[in-house]
Image: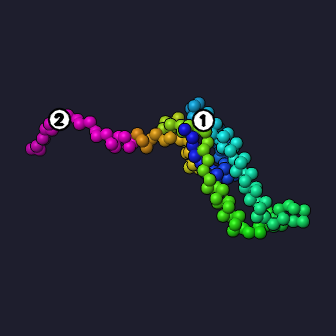
Amino acid sequence: MKVKIKNSFFELTRFNKLVVQNIVNKDFPFKIGYWIGYFFNKVNQESVFYFKEKEKLFEKYAEKDKKGKIKTEKETQNIVFKDRRSFNEDLIKLQRIEIEIPVNKIKVNLNDLEEKRILLKPLEFDFINPIFDVQEEQQEEEKEKTPPKEKKKKKKKLHIAK
């Protein structure tokens, strides 16, 4: 099985390397930790293609100086575009492309992680959610679908106050 992610995921991991490091350094059970590391390694490899295509968009839409280098604003160092609208449209198209990362989903019970004191911040969870097959909700759903076992009804004795 492969995990699908959009190219925009690469932007998140690139600009939030500290979050990725925090995730990788958590004391997950061996198998989960291994697959998380494997996943981020594959994400890093695949991101090379995305960033090459993004660089092509900069080359296509940015203004250039006399030496052929991309112009930037002096104060902010932001790129000066010939056609920012077209650049943004093409960048959005690039970011929406889904790719497959060759990694299996990991069955994870969030209660088990919590019991082992492996706590994930919301942003950390967002980063590894693509490879998690969260079991907590499924178990709860199964409990709801399974009718409760019928208990033998004990006859209650009525106590009458005197």
Q: Which residue is at a point 77% across and 69% down the rendered structure image?
A: 82
Circle 1 — which element? helix
Q: Give yes or no for residue 153 being in the magenta stretch.
A: yes
Q: Which residue is at a point 61% across and 39% down the rendered structure image?
A: 102
Q: Which residue is at a point 72% across and 47% down the rendered structure image?
A: 48
Q: Horizontal and vertical percent for residue 134?
A: 49, 41
CA neighbours of label 2 inside 10 A, class few (<14), some (14 to 19), many (20+):
few
- The region drawn magenta spans 140-162
Q: Nearer the viewer, mark 1 or mark 2?
A: 1
Q: Give the mark, 1 or 2, whose residue is nearer the N terminus.
A: 1
State the residue in front, 91 or 122: 91
Q: Is residue 16 left or right of residue 130?
A: right
Q: On the rendered image, what quadrant is the N terminus found in?
A: top right
Residue at which label 2 appears? 154
CA neighbours of label 1 inside 10 A, class few (<14), some (14 to 19), many (20+):
some
Q: Is residue 30 left or right of residue 111?
A: right
